[in-house]
Image (cartoon, rainbow, N blue to C red):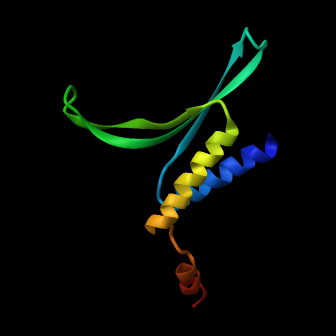
Amino acid sequence: MKSLNGKMRKLQTAIIKNGLVVKINTYQFYSTDQKRMITGYRLMTPYLYYSKKYHEYKTGDFEILHTYSVVDLIYCLLDIYRQMQEWGVVRDFTDEVEEWET
């Protein structure tokens, strides 16, 4: 489980560094049927909306995935990262490194 959490955090960091903010929320509850603690995961990204009630812009969280499996969460993060690469959203840091070296 330790290595899966590490992979999850690395993918999250890679996505954030490339411009998309993703948040991972975890929570636990006790299952009386299974007689053990269950961990749930929520993958979310913030969005901006206009509140008619308060007449101002507010931020909310859009839920991308809700699961109880770390593996499902990793695959979802991997899909997001691959799609960012396909769209050309992933930053190429090689140009920036060359600029730093000169």
Q: Position of residue 91 (x, y in %)?
A: 50, 70
Quarter occupied by the C terminus:
bottom right
Which image quarter: residue 67? Answer: top right
The extreme top residue here reads: 32
Residue 35 x %, y %: 79, 12
Q: What residue is shown at x 49% (from left), y 61% (from top)?
A: 84
> Residue sitting at 71 percent across and 51 percent down?
7
Please state, as top left, top right, bottom left or bottom right, where the N terminus lies in the image.
top right
For residue 39, which quarter of the picture? Answer: top right
The tally of labels here is 0
Residue at image point 53% right, 74% down: 92
Q: Is residue 27 left or right of residue 52?
A: right
Q: Residue at x 62, y 47 (%)?
A: 75
In the picture as drawn, the residue positioned furthest to the bottom comes out as: 102
Which residue is at the front of the view, 26 or 101? 26
Q: In the rendered image of this protein, does residue 35 appear above or below residue 60?
A: above
Q: Is residue 63 left or right of residue 48?
A: right
Q: Is residue 67 above or below residue 17?
A: above
Above or below, 15 against 91 in this view is: above
Q: Nearer the viewer, residue 5 or 34?
A: 34
* 40, above or below 18, in the image: above
Observer able to see residue 75: yes
Residue 89 visible within the image: no
Apparent side of residue 32 relative to residue 101 in the rendered image (left or right):
right
Q: Residue 59 location, x and y as percent?
A: 36, 38
